[in-house]
């Protein structure tokens, strides 16, 4: 199975090279041209030394040869610069293409798929995994071609002047590739283990950071700290195993290359002493012998870049191959009959990942312009129901209608544009506070922004920030507290000014006083809109609030708070539990 996955990853890597074939071809051409220049420089140097040592030629007589050597060296430097520019550009283009493809696929998969993945593992694949691709295309692929081209050029050049040295090089050359293949298998297994360990380490670390408050509350932080340290130590050992294989393989290849060069040197020396070889030819062969083995030695180093890329590509291919639920072609946009459409759910069943069935025969009606509150224990399916209404959770059976239009056959982006979504854990992007607000409505003016800041009780917080609305926020809202982040999400939702509002416990992270103030503002904002919300504080619901009790994916009760708070009902049990908390 592992071999099949690695084969698929290698095929995918080759496919990504198609858009940059011209860049890679240019890089290889520049490298091959450099080998020709190296041969020319080696011949000129051997001729200059022969003339200076044995003919006692004056410096003036050798000046043009020296000028030619300098010119060829400078030209080789230019070709080397162009080669690296082309290879680096190839790596950069492929990395950008893969990043774009991953962003598009994540957008197609939707937040529900992302929520089912380990955040640390996903980040490791998307960041560290993509970073391993550039060395593969910029280093390994060009070097793999040059490892065959450059030795052939050098062998031809040496063979024309000194056939016996060329024969020695030809006989010694297979030693390096054979050992490279033998060592490559162990190195590939070590690289795969290291990459999988890194993914697990990233997942554990992110989970530990996300649950740090809970760990400290239950006095388990030290135990988790030890587990992270153990995972880090295991990753260190795997990394050292990869480096050990890399260093040993490089050492053995250097040994074989050095022995081969030594054999050439000994043969050249004996032939010089016997008078069967001229000095210039012998020096020419000695100068080119290291150049013959240099690409093969470099190939050994670059091979590890390939192993890292193949190991990382397996995780990237998993993301790109994840099945996407595609809406029917030419799906019509939902045109509500009223400004605030009504929602109707009939016999809705849905499953989510390995959690099994999370919605079981949901029958629910939210008339246009009304509000319905979902209550129930944690894990009862409330958030899943909101996801189904947004089209993020595929239905196994049943129907969802918006003013009589079937959601399953509708244009989902157009439908979601009519929704003001307030999640339980809102996301804040890396940018300014203003940038995060304008995600809801980029064309919003300052008056509208000020209005929603007051509604979310965020205006005083903004006034205290060093740069006001232009204060930069780090990823996940670094710089704001949990309650302030929740208020920012409320302000963003209000700025969207959508006719349908879906709230998942909008005031859960706020203190009682602030929550009461914002609830009052949200009540006014929601007038005339269709609202489906999840409530956390059951005791704060008014007697005429329409509620539906959701337990185990089923609606057990539905009615007003006054009707359902009678003893013996599921709602009454929730209320008593909330009062005891």
Image: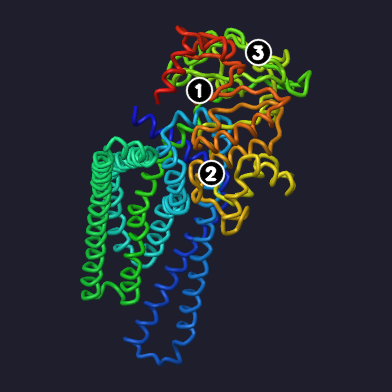
Q: Nearer the viewer, residue 397 or 170?
A: 397
Q: Is residue 201 visible?
A: yes
Which residue shows up at 55% across the image and 19% down it? 374
Residue 420 position (above or below residue 476) = above
Secondary structure category for the residue under label 1: helix
Find the distance from the CA under tag 3 to the CA under tag 1: 27 Å
Which of the labelled discs sits on residue 539, or is there none?
1
Q: What kind of element bears circle 2? A: helix
Find residue 19 and report its horizontal and vertical position in percent: 58, 45
| Residue at the spot of label 2 | 484
The image shows residue 570, relative to residue 6, as above or below, that is above
Q: Is residue 183 visible?
A: no
Q: Is residue 257 left or right of residue 540?
A: left
Residue sitting at x 69%, y 31%: 524
Q: Nearer the viewer, mark 3 or mark 1?
A: 1
- Of marks 2 and 3, the one in the foreground: 2
Q: CA distance from mark 2 to mark 1?
A: 23 Å
Q: Residue tagged by mark 3?
A: 344
Q: Quadrant of the C terminus?
A: top left
Q: CA distance from mark 2 to mark 3?
A: 34 Å
Mark 3: secondary structure = strand
Residue 512, horizontal then vertical, whole percent: 51, 35
Which label's residue is closer to the chain start, 2 or 3? 3
Query: Label 3 crowding class (10 Å Cα cut-off): few <14, some 14-19, many 20+?
Result: many
Closer to us: 171 or 7: 7
């Amino acid at each position: 199975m592992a071999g099949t996955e690695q084969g698929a990853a290698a095929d995918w890597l080759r496919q990504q090279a198609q858009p940059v074939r011209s860049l890679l071809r240019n890089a290889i051409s520049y490298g091959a041209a450099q080998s020709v220049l190296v041969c020319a420089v080696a011949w000129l140097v051997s001729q200059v030394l022969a003339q200076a040592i044995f003919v006692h030629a004056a410096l003036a007589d050798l000046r043009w040869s020296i000028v030619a050597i300098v010119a060829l060296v400078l030209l080789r430097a230019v070709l080397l610069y162009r080669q690296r520019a082309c290879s680096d550009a190839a790596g950069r283009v492929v990395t950008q293409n893969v990043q774009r493809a991953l962003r598009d696929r994540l957008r197609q998969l939707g937040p529900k798929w992302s929520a089912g993945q380990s955040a640390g593992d996903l980040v490791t694949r998307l960041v560290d995994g993509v970073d391993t691709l550039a060395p593969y295309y910029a280093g390994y692929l060009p070097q793999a071609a040059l490892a065959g081209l450059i030795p052939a050029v050098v062998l031809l050049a040496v063979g024309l002047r000194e056939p016996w040295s060329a024969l020695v090089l030809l006989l010694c050359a297979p030693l390096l590739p054979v050992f490279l293949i033998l060592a490559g298998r162990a190195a590939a297994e070590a690289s795969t283990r290291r990459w999988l360990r890194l993914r697990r380490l990233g997942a554990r670390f992110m989970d530990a950071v996300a649950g740090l408050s809970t760990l400290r509350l239950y006095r388990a932080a030290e135990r988790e700290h030890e587990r992270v340290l153990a995972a880090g130590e295991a990753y260190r050992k795997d990394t050292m195993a990869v480096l050990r294989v890399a260093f040993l393989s490089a050492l053995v290849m250097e040994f074989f290359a050095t022995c081969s060069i030594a054999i050439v040197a000994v043969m050249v020396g004996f032939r010089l002493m016997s008078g069967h070889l001229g000095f210039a030819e012998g020096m020419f062969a000695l100068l080119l012998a290291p150049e013959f083995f240099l690409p093969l030695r470099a190939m050994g180093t670059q091979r590890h870049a390939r192993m890292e890329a193949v190991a990382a590509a397996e995780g990237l291919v998993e993301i790109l191959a994840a099945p996407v639920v595609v809406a029917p072609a030419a799906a019509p946009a939902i045109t509500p009959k009223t400004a605030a459409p009504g929602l109707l759910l009939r016999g809705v069943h849905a499953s989510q990942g390995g959690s099994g069935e999370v919605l079981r025969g949901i029958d629910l009606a939210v008339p246009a312009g009304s509000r319905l509150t979902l209550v129930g224990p944690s894990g009862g399916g409330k958030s899943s129901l909101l996801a189904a209404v947004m089209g993020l959770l595929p239905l196994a059976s049943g129907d969802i209608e918006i003013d009589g239009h079937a959601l399953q056959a509708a244009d989902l982006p157009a439908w979601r544009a009519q929704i003001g979504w307030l999640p339980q854990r809102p996301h804040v992007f890396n940018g300014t506070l203003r940038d995060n607000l304008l995600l809801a409505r980029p064309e919003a003016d300052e008056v509208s922004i000020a209005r929603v800041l007051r509604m979310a009780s965020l205006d005083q917080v903004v006034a205290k920030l060093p740069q006001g609305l232009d204060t930069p926020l780090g990823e996940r809202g670094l710089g704001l507290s949990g309650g302030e982040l929740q208020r920012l999400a409320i302000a963003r939702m209000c700025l969207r000014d959508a006719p349908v509002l879906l709230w998942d416990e909008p005031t859960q992270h706020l203190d009682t006083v602030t929550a009461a103030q914002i609830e009052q503002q949200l009540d006014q904002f929601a007038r005339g809109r269709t609202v489906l919300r999840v409530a956390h504080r059951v005791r704060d619901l008014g007697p005429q609030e329409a509620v539906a009790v959701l337990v185990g994916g089923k609606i057990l009760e539905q009615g007003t708070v006054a009707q359902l708070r009678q003893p013996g009902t599921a709602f009454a049990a929730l209320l008593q539990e909330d009062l005891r908390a």
